[in-house]
Image: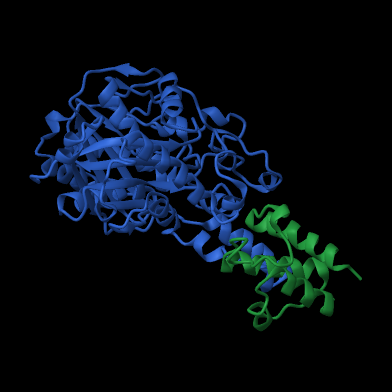
Amino acid sequence: MATREEITSGLAEILEEVAGVNPDDVAEGKSFTDDLDVDSLSMVEVVVAAEEKFGVKIPDNEVQNLKTVGDAVTYIEANH
Amino acid sequence: MSNVDVVVTGLGATTPLGGDVASTWDAMLAGRSGVGPLTQEWAGQLPVRIAAQLAVDPATLIERVKMRRLDRSEAMALIAAKEAWADSGLAGSGLDPERLAVSIGSGIGGATTLLEQDDILEQSGPRRVSPHTVPMLMPNGPAAWVGIELGAQGGVRAVASACATGAEAVALGLDLIRAGRVDVVVAGGVEAVVHPLPLAGFASMRAMSTRNDEPEKASRPWDKNRDGFVLGEGAGTIVLERADHAIARGAKIYARLLGAGITSDGFDIVQPDPECRGGIRAMRMALTDAGLTGADIQHVNAHATSTPVGDMSEIKGIRTAIGDHPILTSTKSMSGHLLGAAGAVESIATILALRESVIPPTINLDDPDERLDLDVAAHKARPLEMTAAMNNSFGFGGHNVALVFARA
């Protein structure tokens, strides 16, 4: 089981690779779109990469609920 | 003839001969070949193992995250267009974005993206296919990205006429300015398909040189021992501008674009008309459009791709439409055949030849075909004062485009 910190840092790696987000900017309270400037196509890439990295399924109808990094961490923690 | 004069105020390119216009032009004048061996693992199985690949990798000029969203052709178009735009001095000039259009085409489009994503689909399933796939493979992608980069709002056009694309895109730019729709057009062509599938397809047509042991000698237009074209990749863009607009802002003017001719053979999907009838009509149309006659043309940058049939039919065409006096060259002997970019990069060579009074050479013309009865600037650059020159481009599908440029 990964901790919340481990999941956050894993997401930070993905966000850097896919969207060029500075890992230092990635924190649970940050919004993907408003704070980290991740657009909708990059978000699709983040989701697919996260599924692979954490061994979870993130259905499309869940993605719209993942507004912040913390939302994603919570979903991954509960489902992986 | 039109009463609106159009001039060229900026040039940009990335080619197998150099990462910009200056290095490409220097390599042409020096008679260097951009053709080399394909060292990729996949090349081993192909009958053709040579190509003219870019001198400078686009990934060294565009940041990594942006490159993830760009097909190689789109990245190359951006590099060439940014150079041309900076060269034109139009940035920050107050040009109304609605008076700026883009006309950049490609022969094949984002084929490498299509093929790479198909590999992912086959191996990993549909969910792994990149969400950027469609905007990367669409043939209007290079024009659209350039339009975004420059903020162009006067229309983004992407013509497709195979190996005549670059020239037709320039001709469309001329039309747009003459029609009064815009004042400035960033026009050109791009191609980036050095990939085993297009190579295998062209090779299956027996259209390509298989001189794998001597890559630099493989592209040899009009030579007796020519055995097909050499695939190249590249991008060329030129900034076309209404002459009074350019003069009013004190722009550097490279040349005037006097006229264009576009025809179709209505003959065969790949074979050129052996009598070059469509090419002749295009050349004559361009001359009429320019208000000139054949006697006024001192130089032709020919289409001549190094194929057995096409090279000689064009010679007949030039002789009939223009006469026996112009000095010819085929810069494809050095750059390889840039397909959709050819007409654009060769327009740049024609413009610089006029401006600098020197015709770049046709290398490898060691043993001319006995039917070659026109003067070619073989082996070495030929100094010549010129007032007007023509650039020819023909494409699969029977597309014929001729452009007439004149000294500024």
Q: Quadrant of residue B154?
A: bottom left
Name the side, left or right, on which B366 lies relative to B355: right
Q: Colour of chain B?
A: blue
| Residue B88, horizontal then vertical, whole percent | 31, 36
Look at the image and tell me in which quarter the N terminus of chain B lies: top left
Residue at image coords 51%, 48%: B75
* B146 over B357 or under it: above or below: below
Is residue B237 left or right of B254 when viewed as pictured?
right
Q: Tell me what residue is drawn at x 41 percent, y 54 percent.
A: B148
Q: Residue at x 58, y 55 (%)?
A: B197
Q: Which chain is green?
A: A
Extreme-right residue of the structure: A1
* Residue B124 image point, x, y percent: 73, 68
- Residue at horizontal 19%, vertical 25%? B325
Q: Position of residue B276 (x, y in %)?
A: 26, 45
Instruction: Give the image's coloring scheme.
Output: by chain
Looking at the rendered image, the quarter that the C terminus of chain B falls into is top left
Q: Is any part of residue B121 visible from this angle?
A: yes
Q: Count of labels shown?
A: 0
Residue B275 visible, this orientation: no
Residue B11 drawn above or below residue B196: above
Q: Position of residue B245 (x, y in %)?
A: 18, 41
Please name whichever residue, B286 or B309, is drawn nearer the observer in this view of the structure: B286
> Is residue B83 left or right of B315 when viewed as pictured?
right
The answer to which image quadrant residue A59 occupies is bottom right
Q: Of residues B192 and B285, which is closer to you in this image? A: B192
Q: Is residue B155 above or below residue B275?
A: below
The front one of B280 and B260 is B260
